[in-house]
Image (cartoon, rainbow, N blue to C red):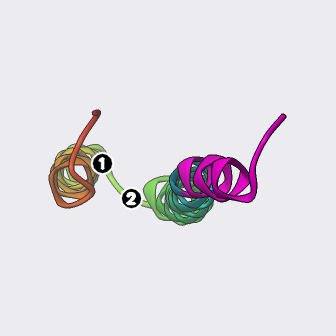
Amino acid sequence: METREDKKMAKEEQLPCDVHRYKIANNEARLTKLEDIMDKVRNRLPVWATFVVAALLAIMGYLVAVISGGPK
């Protein structure tokens, strides 16, 4: 039989998971938008600019990973 405190603790344990899922989904949505925009831009650029854009995307991806704390 669960007590009220047990239920409260169980809910608190679930909360960070839900928050992390929300943050991950939000980040994925933003990254998808960025990728779509970059694909549109990339289709209009010469080859050398495509490499510059790819390098910038790699740097942005690294910074996002560092800022978000990376895999835990």
x, y percent for residue 29:
62, 60
- Label 1 sits on what residue type? Thr
The image quadrant where one finds the N terminus is top right
Residue drawn at 59 percent across, 64 percent down = 26
* Total number of numbered discs in the rendering: 2
1 versus 32 height, above or below? above
Question: Crowding near pointer 2: few (<14 within 10 Å), some, many (20+)?
Answer: few
Magenta residues: mostly which secondary structure?
helix
Q: Secondary structure at mark 2?
A: loop
Asked whether the beta carbons under mark 2 and mark 1 sit within 8 Å of each other, the answer is yes
Q: Nearer the viewer, residue 51 or 62?
A: 62
Question: Residue 50, labelled with which disc?
Answer: 1
Mark 2–mark 1 distance (CA, rounded to whole Å): 6 Å
x, y percent for residue 16:
51, 55
Question: Residue 45, labelled with which disc?
Answer: 2
Question: Residue 66, labelled with which disc?
Answer: none
- Label 2 sits on what residue type? Leu
Question: Crowding near pointer 1: few (<14 within 10 Å), some, many (20+)?
Answer: some
